[in-house]
Amino acid sequence: MRINIVPKKYFHSLKVIILLLLVLNIFGLLIRNKFGVYSLHKISFWFDFDTEHNIPTYFSVFILLLSSFLLFYVGYHQYKKKENVWGWYILAAVFLFLAYDEGFQVHESFILPMKERYDLDGIFYFAWIIPFFVALIVLFVILFNFLKKLPRTTCYHFFSSGVIFVSGAIGLEMLGGWYVSNYSNNDLIWGYIYTIEELLEMFGVSYFIYGLLIYLKDECHILSVKVF
């Protein structure tokens, strides 16, 4: 089976799915926190951005896996052209790990040990952000020369999507940690915080996929991808 590469078409499709999930998530937030209709809790569970093993989680895992697949595909294509591929494969491995982490919440295992050792609170309430932010800086340093050699348009897409994703995954997580440690993790404001966080993450990855598809089409001159 081959999938034709039409970047704008697939990016638009991903945006529509994200918008639909956002509307359903907000609907669930309102019926639980604003109107107190807990009888619909089981239904809203499947669309809540702060709940694991539901539709938004599966969608996030899917787009992260898709990113990993596309990165590996680009690397394989560049390898056949005898070009440097290590940067593509490193990014493919990173997105594969992020997909696994999204599905099994590996990062949460860092919270308790970090808080017990360093007595963290406030913006560091979700203490996993510290080791992951350090890992992000190390990854950026390792990949800096690789990224610098990419076409300007690709660099723009990668950098913009990274800023969007990190703003949600770390920036809004810090804001959420401050709010939870000072107020609550069971009200409408907290719901809005984690909604924006997950929205930025999903949109950031989707925009990254858009940039990858453009690279495949314009730089690698690949018009379709063989899936199986």
Image (cartoon, helix red, strand yellow):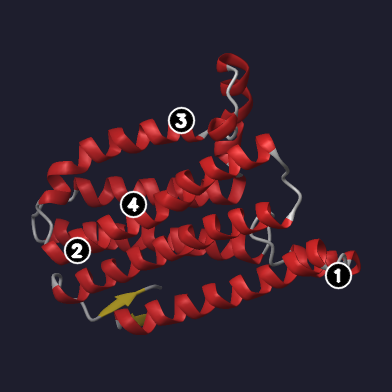
Rendered residue at 72%/72% (across/down) = 27
Quarter of the image holding residue 83?
A: bottom left
Question: Which SS class for mark 3?
Answer: helix
Q: Distance from label 1 to label 3 (Cα)?
A: 37 Å
Q: CA distance from mark 3 to mark 2?
A: 28 Å
The answer to whether 224 is drawn above or below residue 124 in the figure is below
The residue under label 4 is: 92
Q: Going 29% across and 45% down the picture, which residue do you hit?
A: 90
Q: Position of residue 54 (x, y in %)?
A: 68, 62
Q: Are marks 4 and 1 in contact (CB under 8 Å)?
A: no
Mark nearer the N terminus (3 vs 2): 3
Give amino acid for label 1: Leu
From the image, state whether disc 4 or disc 1 is nearer to you. Answer: 1
Residue at mark 2: 154
208 horizontally vs 183: left or right: left
Q: Nearer the viewer, mark 3 or mark 4?
A: 3
Q: Is residue 10 above or below residue 110?
A: below
Q: Is residue 145 left or right of residue 65?
A: left
User: 10 Å neighbourhood of mark 3: few (<14), some, or many (≥20)?
Assistant: some
Amino acid type, residue under disc 3 in the picture: Ile
* Residue 186 rendering spot, x and y as whole percentages: 76, 49
User: Mark 2: which amino acid?
Assistant: Thr
Residue under label 1, please give it.
40
